[in-house]
C-alpha cells in the first residue's frame, strides 16, 4: 500500500502538509527554527504585524489554567517596517509557506498593511485578524459585527492579490453569519477559532492575575468549542476552513478534519511539545494507513457525511 499523501490544497495555497503553525505562540518562528525544522509545517503564520509598532499590554501577560492558558500580550510587535527589513529576509529561507497575520485599529490600517505586503517576495498569503478592537467603534472587535467584518475584509481584499485568510473570533453569538460575511467580502479561507475571552484572580493578592485583567483562553479547554464552530462554519461556507483551538495530538487534528476543516493549525500546544507538528504529521499518516485513506480530501467533513 502506498504511503498516505498529506498534500493539501488550502484555497490557492498548495501545502505539503495540512499542519500549520498558528499565529502568535512562535512569534516570527526565528528562534523556534534553532530547535526544530520549520519545514515540518505546511505553512507558518507569523505573529500579528501592524502598520506601526504596538507596545502590548502591561505584565503579567500569561497565566496557566487547569486545561490551557490565558494570554494578554496585547499583540505587541515591532511594526511593518521592522518586519520587512529584519524578519522577512530570514523567513524566506524556510522551506515552507509563509503567511503574515495582520492587525489594525482602523479599517484603513488593515488595508495599508495588506497593500504593503502585496507582492513582497517570500510572502504566500495574508491572514486578517479581526479580533482587534476598532478605535472608531468604541473598542468593539472588528469580527464581532457583520458590517465591520464585511467592510474590513472588503477593504483588504481590494488592496492585495495574495490569498486572504480571515481569522474569526469565537466571542460572538453567531459565528456562521460572521463567516458568511467574510466569504462574501472576498475571503479565500477562514481560520477559526481565535482565543475565548477569560480571566483569573489571585485570591491571595485579591486582584486579577493578568495586568490587562482580561485575556484570551487557549489550549485543550477550548477544543470542544472550536470543533463545534468548525463543523458549523464548514457546513455553511463554500471556501475552506483552517481549524485550530486546543490541538495537542494527531487524534485532535483528525477530529477537526473529520468535522470539515481542510487543514489545522497548532498554537499553544507547541509550548509543552516543540515537536508537536512532527508528531501530528506522523500520527495522521498512521491513522490514514490504518483506515485505508490515501488523501486528505477523503477525510474532510467525513463525520458530517455519516462516517463509515
Image (cartoon, grey):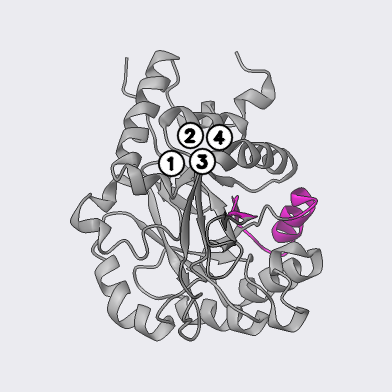
Q: Are marks 3 and 2 in contact (CB under 8 Å)?
A: no
Secondary structure under tag 4 reads helix
In the rendered view, would you say 136 is above or below 192?
Answer: below
Who comes first in sequence, dot 1 or dot 3? 1
Q: Nearer the viewer, mark 2 or mark 1?
A: 2
Inter-mark Cα distance, 2 to 4: 5 Å
91 sits left or right of 162 in the view:
left
Inter-mark Cα distance, 3 to 4: 22 Å
Residue 260: give its label: none
Q: Which residue is mark 2?
A: 253
Q: Are marks 3 and 4 in contact (CB under 8 Å)?
A: no
Q: Which residue is mark 4?
A: 256
Determine the image quadrant of residue 197.
bottom right
Q: Are marks 2 and 4 in contact (CB under 8 Å)?
A: yes
Looking at the rendering, the stretch of residues picked out in magenta corresponds to: 172-197
Tell me where residue 51 appears, x and y as whole percent: 50, 84
Who comes first in sequence, dot 1 or dot 4? 1
Secondary structure under tag 2 reads helix
Secondary structure under tag 3 reads loop
Q: Which residue is mark 3?
A: 66
Tell me where residue 207 appears, x and y as whole percent: 59, 64
Q: Would residue 198 be counted in the magenta stretch?
A: no
Determine the image quadrant of residue 27.
bottom left
Who comes first in sequence, dot 2 or dot 1? 1
Q: Nearer the viewer, residue 257 or 123?
A: 257
Q: Quadrant of the C terminus?
A: top right
Amino acid at each position: 500500500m502506498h504511503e498516505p499523501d498529506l498534500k493539501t490544497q488550502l484555497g490557492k495555497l498548495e501545502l505539503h502538509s495540512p499542519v500549520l503553525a498558528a499565529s502568535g505562540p512562535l512569534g516570527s518562528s526565528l528562534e523556534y527554527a534553532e530547535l526544530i525544522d520549520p519545514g515540518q509545517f505546511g505553512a507558518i503564520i507569523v505573529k500579528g504585524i501592524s502598520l506601526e509598532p504596538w507596545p502590548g499590554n502591561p505584565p503579567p501577560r500569561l497565566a496557566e489554567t487547569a486545561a490551557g492558558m490565558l494570554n494578554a500580550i496585547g499583540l505587541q510587535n515591532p511594526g511593518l517596517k521592522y518586519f520587512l527589513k529584519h524578519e522577512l529576509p530570514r523567513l524566506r529561507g524556510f522551506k515552507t509557506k509563509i503567511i503574515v497575520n495582520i492587525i489594525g485599529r482602523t479599517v484603513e490600517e488593515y488595508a495599508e498593511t495588506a497593500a504593503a505586503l502585496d507582492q513582497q517576495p517570500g510572502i504566500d498569503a495574508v491572514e486578517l485578524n479581526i479580533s482587534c478592537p476598532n478605535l472608531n467603534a468604541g473598542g468593539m472587535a472588528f469580527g464581532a459585527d457583520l458590517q465591520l467584518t464585511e467592510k474590513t475584509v472588503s477593504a483588504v481584499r481590494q488592496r492585495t492579490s495574495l490569498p486572504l485568510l480571515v481569522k474569526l473570533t469565537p466571542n460572538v453569538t453567531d459565528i456562521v453569519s460572521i463567516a458568511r460575511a467574510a466569504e462574501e467580502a472576498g475571503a479565500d479561507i477562514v481560520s477559526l477559532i481565535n482565543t475565548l475571552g477569560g480571566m483569573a484572580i489571585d485570591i491571595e493578592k485579591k486582584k486579577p492575575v493578568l495586568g490587562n485583567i482580561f485575556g484570551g483562553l487557549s489550549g485543550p479547554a477550548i477544543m470542544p468549542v472550536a470543533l463545534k464552530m468548525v463543523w458549523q462554519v464548514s457546513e455553511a461556507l463554500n471556501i475552506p476552513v483552517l481549524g485550530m483551538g486546543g490541538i495537542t495530538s494527531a487524534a485532535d487534528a483528525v477530529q477537526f478534519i473529520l468535522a470539515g476543516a481542510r487543514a489545522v493549525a497548532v498554537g499553544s500546544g507547541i509550548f509543552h511539545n516543540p515537536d508537536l507538528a512532527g508528531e501530528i504529521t506522523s500520527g495522521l499518516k498512521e491513522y490514514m494507513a490504518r483506515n485505508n485513506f490515501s488523501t486528505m480530501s477523503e477525510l474532510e467533513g467525513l463525520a458530517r457525511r455519516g462516517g463509515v
